[in-house]
Structure formats: structure tokens, C-alpha cells
Image (cartoon, rainbow, N blue to C red):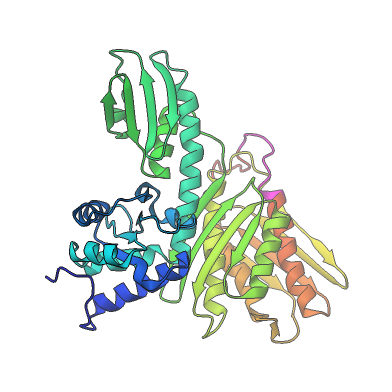
Amino acid sequence: MSRTYLDLSGSSDQRTATALVERLANLLKLDLGGVVLASSPADALRACAAAGVDIADDRTLMGVVGLDAPIAAGAATLLRVGPEQAPLSVIIIANPASRDSVRKALSRPAGLLLEAGLDALRPAARLKARADRDTRGDLLDRAADQLERVAEVRSVQVGPEGLVLEVEPGAELELVDQVGLQGRTDTGRVSYDVADAATARALVDWLGAADNARTATIRRTTKETDIALSVDLDGEGVSADTGVHFFDHMLDQIGRHGGIGLRVVCEGDVEVDAHHTIEDVCLALGEALRDALGDKRGIARFGFETPMDETRASVWIDLSGRPYARFDGAIPGERVGDFPVEMCAHAFRSLAESLRAAIHVKVDGENAHHMVESCFKSFGRALRMAKTIEGDALPSTKGVL
């Protein structure tokens, strides 16, 4: 195998590497030549040591989220863009002679690593990584607060890798047996690596400090679309980038009028049609809402309608666990901006299917823009009512929703 990065063979691996470097350079606003690929952080550090290059900024623990912060000019920076199981890494080196020396000490990353790294740079993957980071941080703060109440624990710090505990001499903790965390002990300090939000949640649940957050983040990938969507039923703020501008506006209506935090990013085949993007985002939204609702204990379950100028739209929701969609109303014309009006009814059918809810929509009016927007606003208001916590009972005589 060649000991240099450059390969002019035209192989699929080289094309993937080229696409990956171009995307990195664009994201980081760097010259293409400053990006050096390595198979793993360990490989990168070994090559840098051999070339006499000091890493001034090591962000490998941050994963792909490390791309969000600016790169300091002139400083050698190490990032891990691939997932832990395929840890493709990137070294940013400004000095041409230094990066040539580093490249000579590296083997070309395998194709599977390159594919994993390129996928991790897609907008949907990056949004999901950020959501996971934020959730993990919140959960670790909660775990730290609970662990500080343990008699043998003097203090707890939340660090980049996880938790660092100051403990009484001879104290033994059972985190390894209970949630699979491997502790490292060093003179009264025990460090636990907590890699992701799922592990942090398992720890918090075991500690009896589970929160009541109604959140969910999912990634949905098909041949036509790649979507990441994060929802917080009790949060606020909407960010939507689907490539269909009017649809982004409608998602904003759902978030704002529904009283939920919503972040959506989608790469879809909008050059073909908006159909797949709108359909798949609504399927993803319904799935995320269903996950965030959990067992639905205490929710109001039902909700309804909104007028808008000459238009009146009514939306009735039953978060029953049984999907059913009904749409009454004829919207004039073919498009509102880049949104096909025929997709309005289809959007609610997709939501009903994945949310597993009965959604009835009725709209009448004259202006297509007003009619479509009123439907989505009404859905948001209906959702706000239906997801409201009214008590702790399950709103069903069946005992399950």
C-alpha cells in the first residue's frame, strides 16, 4: 500500500476522499491542501509525532461537532469526523512542508472509513450529532447532581469525556456493573467515559434522576432524502432547512403555534420534485412527536381550529395510537411558491401515519397561500392542546394509547 495520501488512480475510494476533503474545506473555509486524512486519532498522532508536528487543538472527543468551532490560523488541529466505530480523522496543518511530512507517515484510509466520514459530514448527521451532544450534556449535569448526594463522593465534575468523581479512600462504585461504564481510578479520582446520550440516559435512569423531558431526535435516510429532526414538546425555537422554502415556513408555523422546539434539516431530490422531501419530513416529524410523547400519560389527547383572513381551517387531533387521516377542502391552483398544493393533504396523511393519530383537516377559502398556511397553523394549535399535560392519568378507558 502506498505510504502517501495522494492517489491519482481514479478509484471510487479516491473519489470519496476527494469529495470528503472538498466538503471539509468548504465547511471549515480552508484551502483544500490544508486538510490531511488519517484512519484514526491514534494514527494521526503517530504520524504527527514522526513528522515533528505538535497538535495545538485536539478535538477528537467532540466528534463531528468539533467542526462547529473556528479553526485557529496556523495551529495544527486534530478532529475526528467519523463515528467511534469508524474513526476517520482530519489534521488541519497550515505549513505545506509539515503536512507533506505527515502525509508521508500515513497510509491511505480504507474506503469504509472514507464513506463513514463523508456520511458524518452530511447536514442531517451533523444536526443529529449536535442534538446528541446537547442531550448528553444535560443528562450528565443531572447525573452529577445526583452523584454528589452519595456519601462516599466528595465532588463530581462533568468533562469532555464524561464524569470525574472525587471519592473517599476505599470507596467503590457500582457503575460498571449497573450501566457498563468502565471507571479509571487515580488517587481518589474515578473517571467514567460516557460516549453518548443513550449511555448518559441509562446512567441517569439507574440513579433515579430521570427527567420528564419530552424530546426526540431521529435520522431518516432513504434513496431520495436524508433527514435529521429534533423535537422538544416543551421547548421553543424553530430551525428548518428542507430545500422547499414554503414548506420551511409551514414547519415554522407548526413549531411556533404548537409551542414546541423543532429543528429540521433535509437533503432531498428537490431537483426532481418536492414530493419526497415533504412526505419524508412529515413522516419523520410524526415519528419524533410519537417518541417524544412517550406513554402519553397525563396528556389532553385532543385538540382543534384557526381562522386566517377569508380562510377558515379546522384541525381535529386524537393522539389515539391509531392512524387515520381525513382532508376536506379544495385548494385552488397548483403551487404556493415552491410548495405543490396537492401535498398539503398528503403532508397530514404522512403525519397521521407516523404519529399514529387521527388527524382531520377541513379548510375553505379563496387564497391558496392562506388556505395552506391556515391548515398548518391549525395543526400547530391543535397539537399544542393535545400534548398539554393535564395530570398523570392515561386518557383512555382502554389503558393504553
Picture coordinates of residue 220, whole percent (x, y): 45, 64
In screen coordinates, is 272 left or right of 303?
A: left
In screen coordinates, is 33 left or right of 376?
A: left
Residue 226 to residue 84: above or below: below
As rendered, which of 101 and 81 lies closer to the eye?
A: 101
Q: How many marks?
A: 0
Picture coordinates of residue 59, whole percent (x, y): 38, 50
In percent of the image, x 70 and y 81: which residue is there? 337
Q: Is residue 138 visible?
A: yes
- Kindly give the residue lying farthest to the left in the view shown: 1
Picture coordinates of residue 345, whole percent (x, y): 65, 74
Magenta part, dominant SS: loop
Residue 55 to residue 152: above or below: below
Q: Which residues are magenta?
A: 385-393
As rendered, which of 229 and 183 lies closer to the eye?
A: 183
Please identify the quarter of the rendering in which residue 398 is found: top right
In screen coordinates, is 325 left or right of 312?
A: left
In percent of the image, x 50 and y 51: which residue is there? 131
In the rendered image, residue 353 lying in the magenta stretch gets the answer no
Picture coordinates of residue 381, whole percent (x, y): 74, 56
In percent of the image, x 46 and y 21: which residue is there? 148
In the rendered image, residue 386 lying in the magenta stretch gets the answer yes
Q: Is residue 401 visible?
A: no
As rendered, which of 233 and 23 lies closer to the eye?
A: 23
Please identify the quarter of the rendering in which residue 1 is found: bottom left
